Image: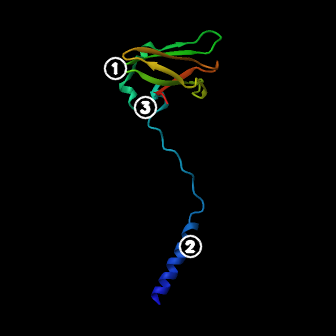
Amino acid sequence: MKSGYLALSLLSAALALPGCDTVRAPYAPAGDPLPASNYPKVAYLDKELPGMLVADPAVVIVDRPEGRPMKVTVPLRSVVEHTMRLQYQYTWRDSLGRPVGQSGWIFTRVEPRVQVPFQANALSMDATDWRLEVRFER
């Protein structure tokens, strides 16, 4: 007799479980430990690149000609003994940090121990800031 009551109790409890919490809050994102102000202007998308390609932030050229969109040139130098086939893309941002365009992926070849200018023009006069992403050719 006890086993019948136990089975009935377990069955009742199992049927009631899905209906216990009918209102659930959506999943919320965790806070980003890297503030936007600390995000790098040049980001390598492949983990091997930081040891292969170096930058000097002091020689980045940001040109804002009167009446024309901004142009950015970031010289990056190979520190390896082989040729690299890379792609890079600029993301242009407005004064509030919103994306206002991308350059699209640009292919380049970097010879051993040579400095190469990674450059592009913004597509909009709204662009006041930039980020550069670099990856191996895909």
Label whose residue precedes the other's in the sequence (1 or 3): 3
Q: Choose between 93 and 105: the one closer to the eye.
A: 105
| Residue type at the position of mark 1 | Glu
Question: Residue 116, relative to residue 102: is it above or below?
Answer: above
Place of residue 53 in the rendered image (x, y in percent of width and height, measured from the top left) = 39, 22
Residue at image position (53%, 77%) is 11
Residue furthest out toward the top: 66
Q: Dots 3 and 2: beta carbons under 8 Å?
A: no
Place of residue 130 in the rendered image (x, y in percent of width and height, measured from the top left) = 54, 22
Question: Residue 4, relative to residue 104: is it above or below?
Answer: below
Place of residue 80 in the rendered image (x, y in percent of width and height, measured from the top left) = 34, 21
Q: On the image, numbered disc 3 is attached to which residue?
A: 46
Q: On the image, numbered disc 1 is attached to which residue?
A: 81
Which-is-in-front pick, marks 1 and 3? 1
Label 1 to label 3: alpha-carbon separation:
18 Å
Q: Choose between 18 and 122: the one closer to the eye.
A: 122
The structure's colour scheme is rainbow
* 62 displayed left or right of 59: right
Please tell me whether mark 3 sits on a helix, a strand or a loop: loop
Label whose residue precedes the other's in the sequence (3 or 2): 2
Q: On the image, numbered disc 2 is attached to which residue?
A: 15
Classed neighbour count for the residue bearing mark 2: other residues with Cα under 10 Å, few (<14), some (14–19), many (≥20): few
| Residue type at the position of mark 3 | Asp
Q: Choose between 24 and 48: the one closer to the eye.
A: 48
Label 2 to label 1: alpha-carbon separation:
67 Å
Residue at image position (64%, 20%) is 124
